[in-house]
Structure formats: structure tokens, C-alpha cells
Amino acid sequence: MNITLMTLLLAMIQVESSNNDMAVGDNGASLGCLQLQAAYVQDAAEHAGQDWTHQDAFERDKAIAITMAYMQRYATDTRLGRPVTAEDIARIHNGGLNGYKKPQTVKYWHKVYAELERMGAL
């Protein structure tokens, strides 16, 4: 599979929020187009040396930057011990830093994969 990170993120945005930058989910715990939680934002901000807050998840450019910083921290070849795949990125996004190992994130990956197919990215 040879897709760009941005294409993957666009598929994830569709799955997470139906492309809605102002989406609120999980009883207010998940915000924005990528449905980011406060701990995820804080973790990414710490890694990137940024002062992002949970409310920044409502701004698409910042939500994407936050997600990319989180992936730069946790979706690395060194950390996984092998090349990182689109599936790894989606499952880490969905299940946290070890989401790529969690069986419950496979269903999320299938949704993202189906969206990538719908987009004609595969």
C-alpha cells in the first residue's frame, strides 16, 4: 500500500467525524475532526514543544499537526521494530501508543481501509 500520510489522515477524518471540524464525541472527551482526547493532545504537545490545548482540536490544521506529532513520537520504525504501516498509524491513533497491538483497534483499521478504498487511494 503506497498512500501518503495526508491521504491516510483524510480517511481517518472521514471515519472519525464525517469531516466535521466541530465534532464532539465520547461525552465531550473527543474533539474535532480527528476526535482527539486531551491526553493525546498533551502528549503530542510535549513531544513537539508546542503549547497546544484540547480546544485546538477544533482547528483542522492544528488537529493534523497534533496527530502528526503524536505519530512522530509513537509510530516509528525504531519503536515498532519494523517499518511503520498505514495500519499501524490508524491503530495507534485509535488505541493510543500501543494501539497497533490491540485487537480492538482492528475494527477501526477496517473502517479506515474501507474509506481509503472509497476515496480511490488504494
Image (tube, grey):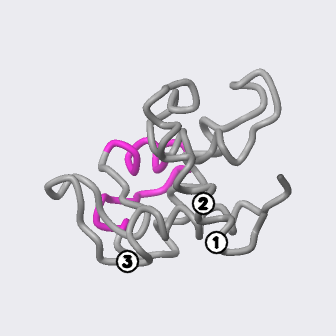
Farthest residue, direction left = 27
Gap between marks 1 and 3 measured at Cα:
21 Å
Q: Could you tell me which residue is drawn at 77 percent across and 26 percent down?
A: 78
Which residue is identified by label 3?
A: 21
Q: Position of residue 103 (x, y in %)?
A: 49, 26
* Disc 1 element: helix
Q: Are marks 1 and 2 in contact (CB under 8 Å)?
A: yes
User: Front-most of 85 and 121?
Assistant: 121
Q: Could you tell me which residue is drawn at 41 percent across and 70 percent down?
A: 33
Apparent side of residue 51 relative to residue 82 in the rendered image (left or right): left
Q: Are marks 3 and 2 in contact (CB under 8 Å)?
A: no
Mark 3 or mark 2, earlier in chain: 3
Gap between marks 1 and 2 measured at Cα:
6 Å
Label 3 neighbour load within 10 Å: few <14, some 14-19, many 20+:
some
In this rendering, the answer to whether 21 lies above or below 8 is: below
Apparent side of residue 22 relative to residue 98 in the rendered image (left or right): left
Which residue is identified by label 1?
A: 118
- First to last magenta residue range: 39-57
Which residue is identified by label 2?
A: 114
Q: Amino acid at mark 3?
A: Asp
Instruction: Look at the image and say whether residue 48 sits in the magenta stretch.
Output: yes
In this rendering, the answer to whether 56 lies above or below 95 is: below
Disc assigned to residue 81? none
User: Front-most of 54 and 32?
Assistant: 32
Gap between marks 3 and 2 measured at Cα:
21 Å
* Disc 2 element: helix
Instruction: Look at the image and say whether residue 68 sits in the magenta stretch.
Output: no
Mark 1 or mark 3, earlier in chain: 3
Q: Amino acid at mark 1?
A: Arg
